[in-house]
Image (spheres, helix red, strand yellow):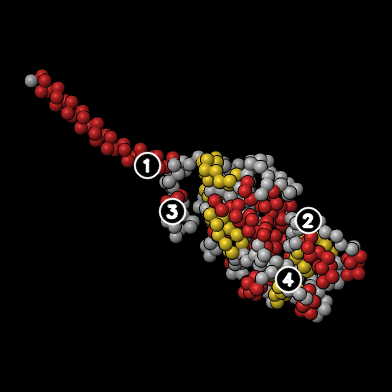
Amino acid sequence: MTLYLSCASCHGIIVSLLILLACLVPRTSQLAQEAAGSVGDDHCHASDQGCMSSRSFARAVMRAIRVTEFGGPEVLKVHNDVPIPQPKSSEVLIKVSAAGVNPVDTYIRSGVYPAKPALPYTPGMDIAGVVHDVGADVKKFKKGDRVYSMRTSSGGYAEFTTVEEKYIGRLSDGITFQQGAGIGVPYYTAYRALLLRGEARPGQTVLVHGASGGVGSAAVQVAKSLGIRVLGTAGTPEGVEAVKKNGADVVFNHREEGYIQKIMDATGGEGPDVILEMLANVNLEKDLGMIKLRGRIVNIGSRGPTEINPRATMGKECTITGVMLMISSDADWKEMHAAMEAGMSQGWLRPIVGKEFPLEKAAETHDLIINTKSAQGNIVLKL
């Protein structure tokens, strides 16, 4: 009798343990998934770009491009174990869906840019995605907001990035993340160059060099929204057609003989009121010959030195000025944010996505943006 009772007790204990294990196994699996980052934001439906999970965020590392030495595109390497940055009190943590690639990214990577980041670093300033967390002092944004930015703290070629609140704009539902990644540097630079530095006004004429590229296509849209006549240039027949489609009034192929005279003819021999110059080391002397009396030449980009005759500025009393987006004042940032928000609501802000690449192809994008014969829209990394 005693032996029988002991076996029965053992049997009951074994059954109880099996039931307990059956309950624990699914929970253990779920915890493992959360630790790997597979539960949460990544389970949002693909069609719901702004969705966020209510589950706690358990990931500690992310995929990101890291640069450990300055050099060519080959120094851009994907790392899978980069710690996810934590936002400071005035910063926002953004889950990145797309990152824009800009020429300035290549200058920084190669080590020729005046302000060099400490190594190692993650490149990228333009991003679009969803707010994942906010610092204690952030007032304008909350978790789940669709946003874009043009200046990151921790680097944009990554699954997550931190951004100061003042460098963030709200992304409308009608703009995709890929388009949003092309708003920051291109549109804000175009607006600042055209209006804040070039002082273009409705009824005037602006010449946009490289009008098929990211900044150039943005400049065309900004100018046309304000009633400014736009002349644009591109380097291929396909680029010329793209600029026309984007709304420019007259477009010229800058590789064709006599294109400068055609520009002068299109302005009645007076020249443009404002010239937006993307490659000053090549075109500045030509710009001085074209610019209208008391016109303004705005230097947006240059890849080396150039030589001009200063007397060329005297006879026309023209102005040559530069533009650098990141030294904008707080008042300028406020104005530019408001202008982009208006552009999205009014429908004239339509970022053109030229090509999309996965993060692993970052090196290819840097080669493409510098060596292309005629850009057609923004180059974007999809995350």
On the picture, is 171 further left or further right than 335?
Answer: left
Give the Cα separation between the discs numbered 4 and 2: 20 Å
Q: Which residue is mark 3?
A: 44
* Amino acid type, mark 3: Cys
Of 348 and 236, the residue lying toward us: 236
For the question of whether residue 377 can be seen, the reply is: yes
Residue 369 position (above or below residue 208): above
Residue at coordinates 55% horizontally, 43% vertically from top-left?
79
Question: Which numbered disc flags the more N-terminal residue, 1 or 3?
Answer: 1
Of 364 and 341, the residue lying toward us: 364
Between circles 4 and 3, the one closer to the viewer is: 4
Question: Which numbered disc flags the more N-terminal residue, 4 or 3?
Answer: 3
- Tag 2, which secondary structure? loop
Q: x, y (%) of residue 326? A: 71, 52
* Amino acid type, mark 4: His
Disc sitting over residue 254 in the figure? 4
Give the Cα separation between the discs numbered 3 and 2: 47 Å
Disc sitting over residue 30 in the figure? 1
Residue at coordinates 56% horizontally, 46% vertically from top-left?
78
Question: Which numbered disc flags the more N-terminal residue, 2 or 1?
Answer: 1
Disc sitting over residue 266 in the figure? none
- Tag 4, which secondary structure? loop
* Amino acid type, mark 1: Gln
Question: How dense is the environment of label 4, judged by Cα within 10 Å: few (below 14), some, or many (20 and up)?
Answer: some
Give the Cα separation between the discs numbered 4 and 1: 60 Å
